[in-house]
Amino acid sequence: MAFLLLWIAVPSPSRGEEAAEITQQCEMIPASAKKKFRQCLDGSYKTFWQSNGGAGAAIIVNVPAGEYASGVWIQWYDHPHAFSLQVQDFDGNWVEYAHSDGVFLSDYLSLPELTTSFRIANASGVSSPLSIAELHIYGLGNRPAAVQVWKAPAEKADLMIIAAHPDDEILWFGGMMPTYAGQRKKTVQVGVLVPSLPRRRLELLDGLWTCGVTNYPVLGYFRDTFSLSLKDQYSRWDKKGVYKLVTAWIRRFKPDVLATHDLQGEYGHGAHRVCADAVIHCLDDAANQKKYPDSAKEYGVWNVPKCYLHLYEENTLDLDWRVPLPWFDGKTGFEIAEEAFRCHVSQQHTDYVVEDFGPYDNSLFGLYRSLIGPDILKNDLFENLE
């Protein structure tokens, strides 16, 4: 592209260090809805900026003097959005440098070397408004570790965690994700039945990324309701629909190890009870070609080798989340889980805390079913698999 020739001769600042965020120093010129634009720069997922559609879905960004932009991180408020990063050619026309297909709520794209001005706009063929919860611009340097670059949901999972709500994957599973995804580099796939509010979905992504999970989670479609019994929760949700979805997830991700909630719902929550009930029911359904033939045709069938339930009182193992993890600079899985729960900002006013002790100890799991023999050492979810 011709515009690159303008920059090749310019000395490049050192790229050995982590890039600093320069968002607040940049000049931002939205093409529409200018009065509310600061709502995507305020550090809160509760607020968002929405542009007009079509040509109005664009933001010109001018980098402050002496700075260069290396990348853009967009956290979409509700629905992912296909977008384009554009720079100007010699004639002043905006031309596309990079684009995203808009698959994930959290999306990062790199910019050309030594960019001082660029535009965020709809991708070709897209006319819907931009709806941005938070926009981040980074200066020259390496992409910060906290900036999320998601991989697609797993083709084949080593470990799958099925939880009821965003934050349950931290509260009730503790150091499981830091230990297995972050430290041991297992492919960990998370599925959450209740998508909840837009801000909680972004909090979910922040928490997973903090734990070292890099495969994008999958979300169910069940509404967020509270009950204290399995029967009552199934009266609010379609039982067959839950079984159908969980069966499809098992078949799709083919986990070697599957972990889910306590059969009693930890403190009794009906949605947690449904999670556990559905998983133990769907272990057989997922392996049965005649059950839910659509997902059997799409993904094939799968017989899960090992399934663990939180607080299950048979075949128990006590996982130690207090072991220092080199991948996290010596922090323990428990400490990382605490950090991840703090990512769930909307839940910090509640009484929930990360605990690997007491009645809801998130390090206590029982082997509900194994196709490869009993655990003997009882200190590793992957015993007999490695």
Image (tube, rainbow, N blue to C red):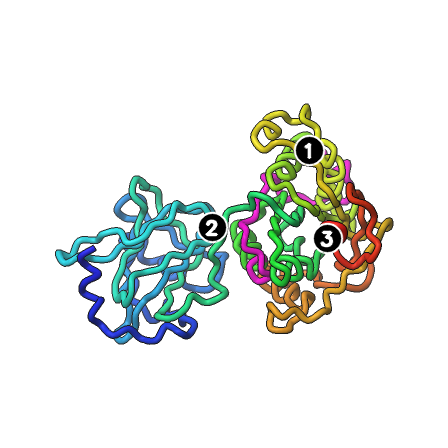
Say what amino acid the circle numbered 1 marks.
Ala
- Mark 2 lies on a secondary structure that is loop
Q: Which residue is pictured at 71% across the width and 33% down the height?
A: 235
Do the numbered discs 1 and 3 sit on residues whose CB atoms are within 8 Å?
no
Q: Nearer the viewer, mark 1 or mark 3?
A: 3
In the drawing, does residue 238 fall left or right of residue 129? right
Disc 2/disc 1 C-alpha distance (Å)? 29 Å
Q: Is residue 371 above or below residue 12?
A: above
- Mark 3 lies on a secondary structure that is loop
Q: Which residue is pictured at 79% across the width and 43% down the height?
A: 370
Upstream in the sequence, badge 3 or badge 2? 2
Would residue 361 be seen by someone viewing this image from the given angle? no
In the drawing, does residue 14 fall left or right of residue 329? left
Upstream in the sequence, badge 1 or badge 3? 1
Q: Which residue is pictured at 49% across the width and 58% down the height?
A: 45
Would residue 106 be seen by someone viewing this image from the given angle? yes
**Which residue is identified by label 3?**
382
**Which residue is identified by label 2?**
105
Q: Which residue is pictured at 28% across the width and 48% down the height?
A: 56
Say what amino acid the circle numbered 2 marks.
Leu
The region drawn magenta spans 208-234
Coordinates of residue 158 in the picture (x, y in percent): 64, 49
Disc 1/disc 3 C-alpha distance (Å)? 21 Å
Q: Is residue 225 magenta?
A: yes
> Residue lying farthest left?
91
Q: Quarter of the image holding residue 359?
A: bottom right
Q: Quadrant of the N terminus?
A: bottom left
Q: Which mark is residue 286?
A: 1
In the drawing, does residue 66 fall left or right of residue 37? left
Coordinates of residue 20 in the picture (x, y in percent): 40, 72
Of residues 341 and 324, the one nearer the viewer is 324
